[in-house]
Image (tube, rainbow, N blue to C red):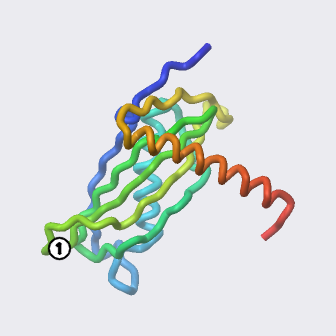
């Protein structure tokens, strides 16, 4: 039975957060781990919205801390499913921020996360395909396939090598 696809926009998550004093490191900006938690949360919700299944984080790729976010920065976190494979989904996340006293939005952190949909027994279950609708969504869909191939190739190369 073929599953009916779902649009990218159906998985879109938009969250806002403000950087509080309890969220900062010794340098006065958001802890990387706290930001990673926000990214994972938004991405997990997007994966759940797309699949309608429980999801678990499989991997995080290209999470880059582009700019610091000091106390008072208003973060805007956007996430959506870029592409679905058999049981996994790549979710793209973009975190931007408005610094106190500035009207200019800056890039804080982009990231790509892979989630696997699981059943009640915690075993992977199939997910519906993604239906990209805009040129940007098509570009992200195609790039997700390239990143997946790169991840799989790296995993094959590292098989048998221990850290």
Instruction: Pick out the residue farthest to the top.
Output: 1
Q: Image quarter for residue 81?
A: top left
Answer with left or right where residue 160 lies relative to residue 139. right
Residue 49 location, x and y as percent? Answer: 42, 34
Q: Residue at (18%, 67%) from the top-left corner?
A: 104
Answer with left or right where residue 117 lies relative to residue 97. right
Q: How many marks?
A: 1
Q: Image quarter for residue 155?
A: bottom right
In the picture, which quadrant includes the C terminus? bottom right
In the picture, which quadrant includes the N terminus? top right
Instruction: Pick out the residue farthest to the bottom.
Output: 26
Answer with left or right where residue 122 lies relative to residue 62. right
Q: Residue at (31%, 73%) from the top-left corner?
A: 69
Answer with left or right where residue 15 lies relative to residue 63. left
Q: Mark 1, residues whose alpha carbon is within 10 Å: few (<14), some, or many (≥20)?
A: few
Does 21 appear above or below 84?
Answer: below
Q: Residue at (48%, 46%) from the top-left corner?
A: 91
Residue 97 location, x and y as percent? Answer: 27, 65
Residue 86 location, x and y as percent? Answer: 63, 32
SS of the residue under disc 1? loop
> Which residue is labeled 1 in the image?
100
Q: Image quarter for residue 108?
A: bottom left
Does 123 appear above or below 59?
Answer: above
Q: Residue at (60%, 54%) from the top-left corner?
A: 59
């Amino acid at each position: 039975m073929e599953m009916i696809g779902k649009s990218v926009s159906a998985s879109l998550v938009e969250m806002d957060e403000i950087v509080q004093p309890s969220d900062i490191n010794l340098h006065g900006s958001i802890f990387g781990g706290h930001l990673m938690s926000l990214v994972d949360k938004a991405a997990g919700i997007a994966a759940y919205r797309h699949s309608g299944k429980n999801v678990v984080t499989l991997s995080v790729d290209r999470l880059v801390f582009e700019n610091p976010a000091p106390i008072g920065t208003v973060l805007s976190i956007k996430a959506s499913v870029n592409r679905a494979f058999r049981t996994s989904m790549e979710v793209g996340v973009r975190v931007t921020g408005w610094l106190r006293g500035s009207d200019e939005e800056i890039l804080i952190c982009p990231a790509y996360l892979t989630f696997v949909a699981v059943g009640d027994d915690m075993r992977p279950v199939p997910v519906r395909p993604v239906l990209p609708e805009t040129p940007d969504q098509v570009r992200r869909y195609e790039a997700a396939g390239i990143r997946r191939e790169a991840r799989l190739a790296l995993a094959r190369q590292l098989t048998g090598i221990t850290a």
